[in-house]
Amino acid sequence: MSSKGKRILILGAGFGGLTAANLLQKNLSTSSAPIDHQISIVDQKDYFMMGLVNLWILNGIRTLEDSKIALNRLENRGIRFLNGEVTAIDFAFKAVTIRGSSSLKIGYDYLVIALGSEFALEQISGFLENGGFNLYDAEQVPKLREKILSLKSGRIAICITSIPYKCPPAPYEASLLINDILVNNGVRDSIDVDIYTPTPIALPVAGAKVSQDVINLLTNNHITFHPLHKIKSVLDRKEIEFENGRTVNYDLLIGIPPHKVPEVIRNSGLMKQGQNWINVDKFSLKTDYENVFAIGDVTEIKVNENIAIPKAGVFAEAQAKVVSQQIINEIKNDKNKQSSPQFDGKGFCFMEVGNKKAGYVDADFYNEQGPTTLLESPSEESYKRKINFERSKLNEWLSL
């Protein structure tokens, strides 16, 4: 790297990190810009896999190993990949400590924090000890599928343990796909499927109308929705205890785990007392530290008193585009305000409902009249779009 080159360090190789790394490399490493900037990305995994693939592993159309894409592919694009855990961030000296096969300290001129969230099922007493499955742990999903296929009767309990959690429709998608599995296995009539949430409606982040649309989908498939049921503990007699005093028996327990900020962020000084996530400027994604940005699940961007931007990959991707362009403009000394982008609060997702159909959710959280969300009726076309979405992003980021 030349003396004038900038060091851009990205922590986390998810939607946000991969988007930022590729955009920065594409726009800062051109024949018209011969200065050698260094773009590095760190992740404790050596592979990338979209979270939505968990659902495809669950319903048997994909395997775990076939879905992992090696992150060292980034090296072919001139992006430095470091496989290790971020253990410390020193904002005063602009350096990050990484522990991999050895400990390494890396300096930066620009830092993009895209570390996502971590799971904390240990916060739910008895969950792990009594055989509960974490829907969001890809390593557990193949075993979960085997368990579902082996059931002949009983109750499957799906528990949203707390909010916020990433990909808000995922628990409902899982319940509908499980319904498909049970129908195809000829045992649906002898197995109850129940979904429990601590919230009064299915998707508070999406509003009452979309929540009711989701509940209607559940009801039409004989899946029982239980609002205002916050799990307290799991007892050793296959019984769930809720904070409202109710207890229910189960034969298979599936949990959407509590989410928490990575410990390195909690210890970094980025979060003020009482905060659970990194607060950033809602448009620029800047933190309180110079040339330090945070994007995606590790952040909390409040839209109003009750709603924050959902923890979902498409929002991390959109935020990464905004942050990357700001860095590019500054390095290229582009002072044109029209080229300085802002995060617009818009996003979408595909909600899989089974039978190779998916709904399409369109959201605008910065709408002047208040957040708006619309769920289009499930269709085979939206399901195909979801399949193509994964393929196109993997090709864009990792050259599949």
Image (tube, rainbow, N blue to C red):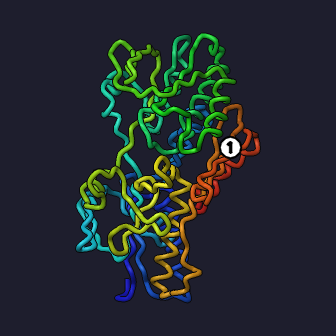
Please provide percent x and percent y for residue 243: 37, 24
Position of 160 compared to 349: left or right?
left
Please provide percent x and percent y for residue 198: 45, 31
Is residue 33 visible to us here? yes
Q: Is residue 294 above or below residue 356?
A: below
Please provide percent x and percent y for residue 71: 46, 58
- Identity of the residue drawn at 23% across and 73% down: 92
Depth check: 299 or 53 in front? 299
Position of 60 compared to 102: left or right?
right
- Identity of the residue drawn at 31% across and 55% down: 85
- Identity of the residue drawn at 62% across and 20% down: 182
Q: Is residue 76 above or below residue 357?
A: below
The C terminus lies in quadrant: bottom right
Please provide percent x and percent y for residue 343: 54, 65
Mark 1 closeness class: few <14, some 14–19, many ≥20 residues within 10 Å: many
Amino acid type, label 1: Leu
Query: Would you name the residue on which mark 1 appears?
Result: 375
